[in-house]
Image: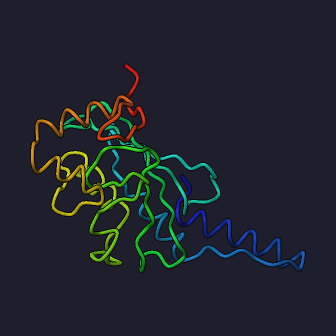
Amino acid sequence: MLKIWSMKKEQQKAENAEGAAGGKKKKVTAAQLRVQKDLSELSLGNTMKTEFPDPDDILSFILYVEPDEGMYKDGKFSFTFNITPSFPHEPPKVQCREKIYHPNIDLEGKVCLNILREDWKPVLNLNAVIVGLQFLFLEPNASDPLNKEAAEDLRANREGFKRNVKISMSGGTVKGETFDDVRRPR
């Protein structure tokens, strides 16, 4: 990972080269600097990792979450993070790439996490979002659902919900919906 100062030095080198050539210069934005700082402070542990499909674009990346406890244990889930130039004044856009059975993630992958909506504040960082995602797998929240059927299932019959999570994680069908197989290879 590049450090903030090395990004600044690269920018200055590019500006000097562009200036000599008479071209346009590409500036490092405030959002890029903040994301770089947030990424350098991440503590992902062994259950999460990031991937940057375009190494030159730190505002778009993939987070992989592999819960090692809870109902979603042994699953592998990936989330796209798209960060606008307005970051940190706007939250990152986060979406689950797999179709999963979860009260707080709908069938299109939209994530219901309060800090990604009304509770976002510029003092929050990417680590807060990642911890929030991790917590959704440990303790799904039936009182603030995006997938109302899964939430009702969790409220009405926790053991039945756990069975449905296992079925769905193996690519099975629950309540007429077929889900992606998200089990980690053993």
Give percent across and percent down for residue 20. Answer: 87, 76
Total marks placed: 0
Instruction: Report x, y in % for residue 122.
Output: 35, 78
Quarter-wise, where is residue 148 in the image? bottom left
Q: Which residue lies furthest to the right in this view?
A: 21
Q: In this view, does 21 lie above or below 5?
A: below
Picture quarter containing residue 180?
A: top left
Examine the rendered structure and indicate whether residue 20 appears above or below residue 45. below
Residue drawn at the location 21% of the way across and 63% of the way down: 144
Which of 105/79 is in front?
105
Colour scheme of this structure image? Answer: rainbow
Q: Residue at x 52, y 54 (%)?
A: 61
Image coords of residue 156 (percent x, y): 9, 48
- Closer to the camera in the image, 150 or 62: 150
Residue 35 in the image, given as x and y percentages of width and height: 47, 66
Locate the C terminus by quadrant.
top left
Q: Residue sitting at 20 percent across and 51 percent down? A: 140
Q: Residue at x 40, y 37 (%)?
A: 178
Determine the residue located farthest toward the front in the rendered image: 176
